[in-house]
Image (spheres, rainbow, N blue to C red):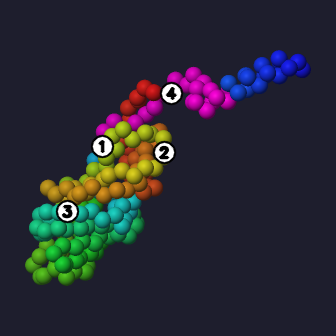
């Protein structure tokens, strides 16, 4: 092979490699992103995905009978969800059920008569997780994003969790698919 032909082949291979590295190739597939923030009704799958994530409510949660700083974390698994809450030096925990959030208190240091006292059941509606997903690229890659827990009229401060969106619009919190969200194409 002549030197000029070798140079031509080498140039063609280099150009193809460069084009591939740059994402070229004429693909007309649009990039899909989440079109809005996700409001996810709490359920056992969501609670299991968020187990161990602490949500802080600086002004309390009226539905739980607290008026000062209150923290709530789901515990357990999707098969056996639970909760732990603390406020004003007191704590409570127990099992969680859904349809709204239904907290059955099985251990507590709150005084008798308080909504979080031992043996009480507290139902909170709405009970949602608001995930800041607007603009999340639907490529399945997990990134840290802000989420907040809404209990009745109280919204927690943002907590950071791992969030991903796949090409089918499935929203993934800490590795668990929790819902499907709307996607919109953007031009690259």
Q: Which mark is residue 140?
A: 2
- Residue 182 left/right relative to 31: left
Q: Tell me if mark 3 has few (under 14), some (14-19) or many (20+) residues whose alpha carbon lies within 10 angstroms of its own.
A: many
Q: Which mark is residue 29?
A: 4
Mark 3 or mark 2: whose residue is earlier in sequence: 3
For marks 3 and 2, give the one nearer the viewer: 3
Mark 4 or mark 1: whose residue is earlier in sequence: 4
Reading the image, the residue beneath label 1 is 37
For marks 3 and 1, give the one nearer the viewer: 3
- The range drawn in magenta is 16-37
Q: Which mark is residue 57?
A: 3
Q: Tell me if mark 4 has few (under 14), some (14-19) or many (20+) residues whose alpha carbon lies within 10 angstroms of its own.
A: few
Determine which quarter of the picture holds residue 102: bottom left
Gap in angstroms between the C-alphas marked 3 and 1? 20 Å
Gap in angstroms between the C-alphas marked 4 and 2? 16 Å
Q: Position of residue 24 (x, y in %)?
A: 58, 26
């Amino acid at each position: 092979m002549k030197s000029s032909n070798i140079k031509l082949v080498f140039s063609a291979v280099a150009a193809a490699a460069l084009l591939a590295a740059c994402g070229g190739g004429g693909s007309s597939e649009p990039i899909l992103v989440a079109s809005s923030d996700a409001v996810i009704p709490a359920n056992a799958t969501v609670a299991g995905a968020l187990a161990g994530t602490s949500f802080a409510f600086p002004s309390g949660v009226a539905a739980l009978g607290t008026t000062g700083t209150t923290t709530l974390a789901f515990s357990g698994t999707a098969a056996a969800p639970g909760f732990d809450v603390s406020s004003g030096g007191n704590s409570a925990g127990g099992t969680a059920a859904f349809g709204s959030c239904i907290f059955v208190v099985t251990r507590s240091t709150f005084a008798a008569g308080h909504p979080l006292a031992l043996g009480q059941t507290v139902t909170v509606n709405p009970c949602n997780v608001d995930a800041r997903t607007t603009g999340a690229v639907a490529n399945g890659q997990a990134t840290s994003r802000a989420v907040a827990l809404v209990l009745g009229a109280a919204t927690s401060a943002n907590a950071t969790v791992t969030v991903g969106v796949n090409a089918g619009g499935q929203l993934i919190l800490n590795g668990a698919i929790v819902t499907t969200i709307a996607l919109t194409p953007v031009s690259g």
